[in-house]
Structure formats: C-alpha cells, structure tokens
Image (cartoon, helix red, strand yellow):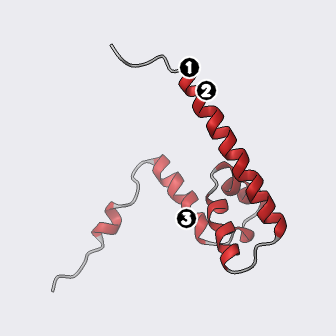
C-alpha cells in the first residue's frame, strides 16, 4: 500500500499573497470570536463576516445565543441584504454592455 506524501494538502494551499491573506482570515473562524482583540473581532465580524457566519449559528445550536445577538444578527442580515440588492440594481443600471 502506498503512503501519502501530503502533496494533495500542499497543492490545495493558496499560492498568491491575496490567497494567503484570505486563508488566514478564514482560519480565524475556527475559534470563538470572543478570544480575539476588539479590532480583529470587528474585522472578522463586519468586514469579512466569517465570524458572523460561524459564531451566531454555533451559539444558537449550543443554546448560548442571547436575544441581543439574535436581534443584532437579524438587523445585520436585513441591512446586508438591502445593501446587496441596492448595489446589484446600481450595477445593472450603470452596466454599459459588452456586446459588439
């Protein structure tokens, strides 16, 4: 039986600097958001919402989700959806087209 050299894992890693940057951010979602300093907590919750996507459902499943977090999650979700919809429509209105 052939032994694995681990090359599949090494080849799946990002090779660009931006790929490494985002890989580092996504790895922050592996631990509870409460262990990070406030500036990093803000960044991974709102700028790249990986903590929001992981922490809120995990707290809900483990019955640690308080009503303030639930209310904030609902407001944040509605606001993000509203912004995405507005931005999509803005892009459609200002798209010049790519046909010849």
Q: What is the x, y in percent for residue 62?
A: 68, 80
Marks 1 & 2, CB-CB < 8 Å contact: yes
Give the total of numbered labels.
3
Residue 59 as seen in the image, left or right of residue 15: right
Q: Which residue is mark 1?
A: 94
**Is label 3 or label 2 in front?**
2
Residue 34 as seen in the image, left or right of residue 96: right
**SS at mark 3?**
helix
Residue at the far left in the pictured view = 1
Crowding at dot 2, Cα within 10 Å, few <14 / some 14-19 / many 20+, comes out as few
**SS at mark 1?**
loop
Which residue shows up at 74% across the image and 52% down it? 76
Q: Which residue is mark 2?
A: 90
Picture quarter with the C terminus: top left
Which residue shows up at 58% across the image and 58% down it? 25
Q: In the rendered structure, which disc, 3 or 1, sits on the residue that comes first in sequence?
A: 3
Q: In the rendered structure, which disc, 3 or 2, sits on the residue that comes first in sequence?
A: 3
Which residue shows up at 69% across the image and 52% down it? 77
Q: Which residue is mark 3?
A: 27
Q: CA distance from mark 3 to mark 1?
A: 36 Å
Which residue shows up at 66% across the image and 77% down it? 61
Q: Residue 82's image quarter?
A: top right
Marks 3 & 2, CB-CB < 8 Å contact: no
Residue at the far top in the pictured view = 100
């Amino acid at each position: 039986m052939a032994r694995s050299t681990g090359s599949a894992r090494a080849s799946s890693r990002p090779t660009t600097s931006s790929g490494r940057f985002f890989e580092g951010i996504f790895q922050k979602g592996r631990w509870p958001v409460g262990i990070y300093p406030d500036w990093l907590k803000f960044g991974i919750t709102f700028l790249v919402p990986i903590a929001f996507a992981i922490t809120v459902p995990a707290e809900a499943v483990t019955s640690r989700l308080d009503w303030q977090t639930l209310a904030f999650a609902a407001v944040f979700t509605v606001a993000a959806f509203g912004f995405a919809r507005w931005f999509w429509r803005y892009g459609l209105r200002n798209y010049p087209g790519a046909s010849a």
